[in-house]
Amino acid sequence: MTQNAAFSEMPLPLFNGDEALQSPALPRAKLPSYIRDHRKRLRQRFLEGGAGAMPDYELLELVLFRAIPRQDVKPLARSLLDRFGDFNGVLSSDPHSLAQVSGVGEAVICELKIIEAAAHRLARSRILQRHVISSWTQVIDYCHTTMAHRETEQFRIFYLDRKNVLIADEEQARGTVDHVPVYPREVVKRALQLNASALILIHNHPSGDPTPSAEDIDMTRQVQAACDALGITLHDHIIIGKSCEMSFQAEGHL
């Protein structure tokens, strides 16, 4: 992985005190006050106002503080945002792409991926074992959190019981930047294994435009035909873009 001396990584600190770490290269007494004071101000502002009080680059700095405890991380935060667009884009980027940014090593990647995993798990907990239709906002939020910034297409399925409670959220396939293979037979086979009564299909468009392609529409009709033959309800197919989504049900495709 690419490593820049300006952002040398150190063992991650616990709880307090990344500034309390001792380093032969930079003893505590010589820690520049602008770094110490800047970190203190950012942390205080976050504690008082939450994430809403901070722009993306400052929130990213807070994450980077633990991975790079004794240097100014603002330039690296800016570089990451320039490369990946926004805070969510940085967190969602794959490790190989992150490693191409000068100054990013294993500790930075680990911190970013921990935050991403926590966000996914929190969003998923808000919909699992819940009535999906009445929790639609949380469903859409979860889909955007997990899929909107992916660089390749992912196809996942929500399996529901007869009361429309989510019983399984599974990735069915991964593809390229503009295509993901989907096999209707495998979709309904898995539904039968789970004793699911209904499905919701979800996939993302890395281009950011959720407009369905002719192939998307044709595949959805094939899945619907397979579901109809077995008495399974296909509630919707949602395409996730960068900042919006498209519902086949709402657009009259189902």
Image (cartoon, helix red, strand yellow):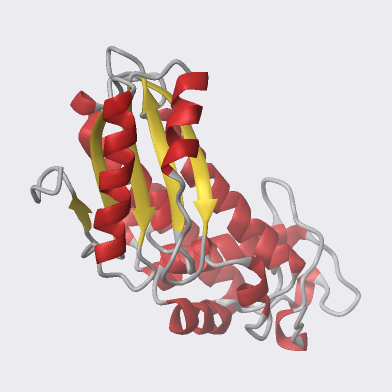
Residue 250, by quadrant, is top left
In-image side of 70 versus 128 (left or right): right
In-image side of 8 versus 153 (left or right): right
The residue positioned 74% from the left and 73% from the top of the image is: 105
Residue that extends furthest to the top in the rendered view of this protein: 163
Residue 224, by quadrant, is top left
Residue 129, by quadrant, is top left
Residue 168 lies, with reference to residue 70, above or below; the image says above
Residue 110 lies, with reference to residue 36, above or below; the image says above
The residue positioned 87% from the left and 80% from the top of the image is: 25
Give whichever of 210, 198 is nearer the camera.
198
Give whichever of 145, 225 is nearer the camera.
225
In-image side of 219 versus 115 (left or right): left
x and y percentages locating residue 62 in the rendered image: 53, 62
x and y percentages locating residue 239 in the rendered image: 28, 54
Residue that extends furthest to the right in the rendered view of this protein: 24
Residue 186 lies, with reference to residue 43, above or below; the image says above
Quarter containing the C terminus: top left
Give whichever of 25, 156 is nearer the camera.
156
The residue positioned 14% from the left and 49% from the top of the image is: 253
Quarter containing the N terminus: bottom right
Is residue 225 among what the camera can see? Answer: yes
The residue positioned 31% from the left and 45% from the top of the image is: 222
The tally of labels here is 0
Residue 218 lies, with reference to residue 159, above or below; the image says below
x and y percentages locating residue 16 in the rendered image: 67, 49
Is residue 213 among what the camera can see? Answer: no
In-image side of 207 versus 71 (left or right): left
